[in-house]
């Protein structure tokens, strides 16, 4: 094995196994190299390799004693910062479970070896709804590029059938949109942009986008009265309310909206060729009742009775 490979092995050993609370001596480094069937180098050779790594920019701390001790100093992030990032990854609904595991594993590389046991309590994917779109991270990156470079994007957009099958809207037609901003709400990414087909500013949930392409065509100028803050407030205003288990009767066309709100694991039951039932926990708030009302009669609240009565009272308030 060449000196270059030996130096890289020393780097690997220091990075994987050392920290402020766990240091190693030159003799321990030599023992490690011998596990790779390398001739046992002398101390001057190891010191020269370590000096080369330091020159390269690696933060190797030398604790000068009778027998010098070596360990990695800065790893760019401290333990608290990495734990915070792991929490963010796990709680983000737009990141799929598999991608979450990959990212958490990578983040763990920035923790000192003796600190990794502190992450075990966090190494799980919680029960919140997670995206199933594995390409969502790349789509987010491409959308940001399009926004910065002011380029239009084309993509397909999908919904769900009553059988929870993905189906592209309008027979797989490609949308052409001028992206203006990315919004984050309820642990989901949304892209806001000008839809050429609809002639207005619209919102698209990023994990429903597929086959995205950033074009060379410049974006449509924003409408004069458009601001991201006002649009966000109008689109995602939220209200708190008492939580309750509700049963909803919905027309098949609403399956996409149901999965948008409750995730793909929501309990549904096909009623007939045109309807299905949904059982889910919601906050009995104006936001929830407004969402039901916005279905235009395609959704009915079956239970609990309190929700039925509250919704009727709201409808009555609209009567003259």
Image: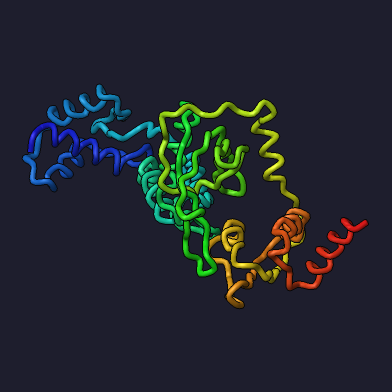
- Percent from the top left, x then y, of residue 12? 24, 40
Of 282 and 45, which appears nearest the observer? 282
Whether residue 144 sits left or right of residue 61 in the image: it is right
Quadrant holding the C terminus: bottom right
Of 205 and 11, which appears nearest the observer? 205
Q: In the displayed image of the protein, which residue is found farthest to the bottom?
A: 272
* Location of residue 189 (image quadrant): top right
- Percent from the top left, x then y, of residue 197? 55, 41
* Location of residue 286 (image quadrant): bottom right
Of 97 and 16, which appears nearest the observer? 97
Whether residue 281 sits left or right of residue 177 in the image: it is right
Of 122 and 31, which appears nearest the observer? 122
- Percent from the top left, x then y, of residue 151? 46, 29
Q: Residue at x 45, y 40 (%)?
A: 154
Quadrant holding the N terminus: top left
- Percent from the top left, x then y, of residue 318? 87, 56
Q: Residue at x 16, y 44 (%)?
A: 31
Whether residue 306 sits left or right of residue 275 in the image: it is right
What colour scheme was applied to this rendering of the protein? rainbow
Q: In the displayed image of the protein, which residue is found farthest to the right?
A: 320
Q: Is residue 56 above or below residue 37?
A: above
Q: Is residue 312 above or below residue 269?
A: above
Task: Tell me how many marks there are.
Answer: 0
């Amino acid at each position: 094995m060449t000196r270059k490979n030996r130096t890289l092995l020393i780097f690997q050993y220091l990075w994987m196994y050392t920290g402020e609370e766990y240091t190693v001596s030159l003799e321990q480094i030599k023992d490690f190299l011998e596990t790779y069937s390398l001739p046992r180098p002398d101390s001057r050779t190891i010191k020269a390799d370590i000096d080369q790594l330091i020159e390269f920019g690696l933060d190797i701390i030398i604790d000068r004693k009778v027998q010098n001790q070596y360990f990695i100093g800065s790893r760019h992030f401290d333990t608290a910062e990495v734990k915070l990032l792991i929490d963010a990854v796990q709680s983000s609904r737009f990141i799929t479970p598999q991608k979450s595991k990959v990212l958490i594993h990578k983040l763990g590389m920035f923790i000192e070896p003796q600190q990794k046991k502190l992450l075990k309590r966090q190494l799980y994917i919680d029960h919140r709804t997670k995206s199933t779109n594995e390409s969502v991270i790349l789509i987010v990156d491409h959308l940001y590029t399009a926004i910065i470079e002011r380029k239009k994007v084309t993509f397909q957009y999908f919904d769900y059938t009553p059988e929870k099958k993905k189906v592209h809207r309008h027979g797989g037609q490609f949308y052409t949109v001028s992206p203006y901003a990315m919004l984050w709400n309820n642990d989901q990414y949304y892209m806001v942009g000008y839809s050429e087909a609809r002639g207005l500013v619209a919102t698209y949930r990023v994990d429903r986008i597929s086959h995205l392409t950033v074009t060379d065509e410049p974006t449509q100028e924003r409408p004069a009265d458009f601001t991201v803050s006002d649009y966000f407030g109008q689109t995602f205003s939220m209200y708190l309310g008492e939580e309750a288990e509700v049963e909803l009767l919905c027309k098949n066309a609403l399956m996409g909206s149901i999965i948008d709100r409750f995730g793909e694991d929501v309990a549904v039951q096909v009623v007939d060729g045109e309807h299905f039932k949904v059982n889910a926990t919601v906050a009995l708030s104006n936001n929830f009742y407004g969402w039901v009302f916005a279905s235009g009669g395609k959704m009915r609240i079956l239970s609990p009775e309190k929700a039925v009565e509250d919704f009727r009272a709201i409808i009555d308030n609209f009567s003259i």
